[in-house]
Structures are given as structure tokens and as C-alpha cells.
Amino acid sequence: MRILVTGGCGFIGSAVVRHLIDATDHEVLNVDKMTYAATEESVADVAASDRYTFAKIDICDGPAVEQVVRDFDPDRVIHLAAESHVDRSIDGPEAFLSTNVLGTMHLLQAVRHTMDGRDGDFRFLHVSTDEVFGALQPNDPPFTESTPYSPRSPYSASKASADHLVRAWGETYGVPTLITNCSNNYGPFHFPEKLIPLVTLKAIAQEPLPVYGTGENVRDWLFVEDHAAALATVAISGEEGETYLVGGNAERTNLEVVEAICDLLDDRLGESPLGPRRRLIEFVTDRPGHDLRYAINSSKLQRELHWRPTVTFEQGLAQTVDWYLENESWWRPIQDGTYRGARLGLR
């Protein structure tokens, strides 16, 4: 089977590429624009495989997308290419609308045109987020596939728009589509603008650890390699037209996450002369429109496609912290150039 992965040098995309090469016998084409958050190192372990090919293409370049889809003629598309950081979307929403909405449209059009007259099995999997559903209150049940949309940030609005486009291309043009909505991912190769890698690197350096508001915001955390396995399962075996939610069954407040990182690093590196790393926590001005809680009910995916998370939050966080301790050669150039840990999203 030929599988085209967009955004395959990004955080989740690279995990999908590695999973497909390491755990399956499928042929993989990685299409990536190589933005600030993409790194070739994230797929270096599989790049030498004769089943792996890379194409540097911006999905907003309609003719280039048409050409690469036509040439590769995929059996599956797993669409992950997206601008994804909420804080950046507050500062600059234009890039999010361009890539996440128009880029998705170009990809859908290319697939639609390639499908004309094509026989055989095909699926287009669009990878989305739980943020399209808005905020939950503390006692609300988790999101399900039937939860109404209520996006509250430029990022989530752009992903919700893309979700609607995917469903429209399925209904109007007959493109065999699938959608997944996932909870917060974490793990190796995570660009350090996101909470867990940002706090991990600042805690290693014993710098102040910013926590938005009071730290009470809750997220359901999903280890990225579990997510990659879920996406492969849905892309290959999911039923056309269906949506599947993917979660880690690991709700934690932001403050609990930061405290757990501090404790892991104290255990591995020892406390400083000034005391444990929890002393570095600083509560800062909250993000505009910061949703209180997200939580995922992934029972449909577990029941119908027999996927379930295999890594607990405690296991995954320990693996993640250890990876950053062991891979300074990956994150140090980012800190020295692309991203220095500055606060975003205050407007």
C-alpha cells in the first residue's frame, strides 16, 4: 500500500512516518514544507529505507500538490500538515487560515482529480484536534464524535473549517474521507514552544517555569507513538465517512504536568542548592480565550478498530523527559536560533 503523509517532518507526522516504516511494510511519501517546527532529524532513523521518499512541497501550492499526488498515486493520504500552536494563531491568524484551510482544500482537490477513473480502495484521513469542540466544564462528560463544534481560537477555528471541508468533499465529490480528533500529544521531537518540552528545557536550565493563569486548565494527554499507531489503524481500516476520537485517558491540570516534570528532573539531575525545581514555577497572565478543559472519549475507536493507548502518562512523561536529557544535540540548535522560549499569544 502507498501512503502519502503530509507534514511528515513535524512532531506527530514524523511519529506516523516512523511507525509506518518500522511497523508495517507500506511505502511512504512524506510531503512537508519544512516550516520552523519541522526537522529532518525526526525521520533520520527511517530515511534510508527503500520504502521512504521525501518531497519538499507547500500544500498551499496547488499545482505542486496536484503533481505529487498524481505521480505517487496513493492508496491512503494521512493529512497532518498544519499550523498548530494556539499562541501563534493569536499573534498571526493568517498563516493558520492559509495552511489549515486553503492547504487542505488544495489537497482534497488533488485527491479528487486523481481519483477520477481510479479503481480500488482509497481513504483520505484528515487529522484534527479536540479543540474544535470548545471547552468542557469540570463535571462535563468527555467529547464524543457527536459533540457539537464550538471553536474558540483562530487555530481551532481553522481546524474546524478544514474538518467541514473534508466532510463536504466526501458528500459533494465522493472522496472517501475519514476524520480523527485527538487530545494533546507529547513525546520525543516535540518543538519546544509547547508546554511539556518548553517546561522541560527551562527546568533543565533552572529558569522560571511559566504557568498560565492558576494552572487549573485540564488536558487529556496522549503519547505521540500511541497516536501514530491509532492514525495508521484508522487510515488502513477505518470505515469511509466516519470520525474517530483519539485520547490518552490521562486528564491532568497544567500545574500537575509542570510539577511532574520538576519532580522527574530533580530525580535525574538532583535538586539545585536553592531547592527543588517546583520553586521555579511562576503563574503568568493567562492566554486569551484559554479553554478550561478538554477530554476525549475514544471508546468508538477502541470498540470498532481495537486500538487503545498503551503508554500511561507517567510512563510517557518519563520517556519524554529522558529523551530531552539525552538529545541536547536536537534541541540546542532550536533554542539558539529558531525559538528562544519567548512568550507568544498575548494579544
Image (tube, rainbow, N blue to C red):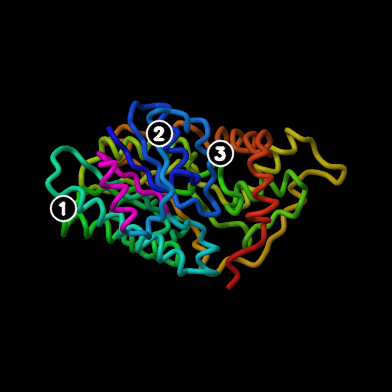
Distance between the Cα atoms at labels 3 and 2? 14 Å
Of discs 3 and 1, which sits in the foreground? Answer: 3
SS assignment at label 2: strand
Q: Secondary structure at mark 1?
A: loop
Q: Residue at x 52, y 30 (%)?
A: 45
CA gap, disc 2 to disc 1? Answer: 29 Å
Look at mark 2 in the image and give the residue it sits on: 52
Residue at the image point whose x is 44% and y is 48% from the top:
56
Residue 182 appears anywhere in the view: no
Where residue 276 sits in the image (x, y, percent)? 78, 43
Question: As shown in the figure, which amino acid type bears the numbered disc 3?
Answer: Glu
Q: Earlier in the sequence, mark 3 or mark 1?
A: 3
Query: Looking at the picture, how far across and down is residue 345, in whole percent?
Result: 58, 67
Of 141 and 164, nearer the camera is 164
Quadrant of the image containing the N terminus: top left
Please tell me whether mark 3 sits on a helix, a strand or a loop: helix
As drawn, the label of residue 82 is none
Query: Within the image, what quadrant is residue 341 found in?
Result: bottom right
Name the residue that disc number 3 marks. Answer: 41
Is residue 154 on the magenta stretch? no
Q: What is the three-letter code of the residue carrying label 1?
A: Gly
Residue 299, position in %: x, y?
33, 41
* Foreground pick, 86 / 303: 86
Which residue appears at 57% of the width and 51% of the height?
Answer: 253
- The disc at residue 174 is 1
Residue 347 seen in the current view: yes
Q: Residues within 10 Å of mark 1 (few under 14, many from 20)?
A: few
Q: Can residue 72 be found in the magenta stretch?
A: yes
Instruction: For the C terminus, give its image quadrant.
Output: bottom right
From which residue to which does the magenta span run? 63-81
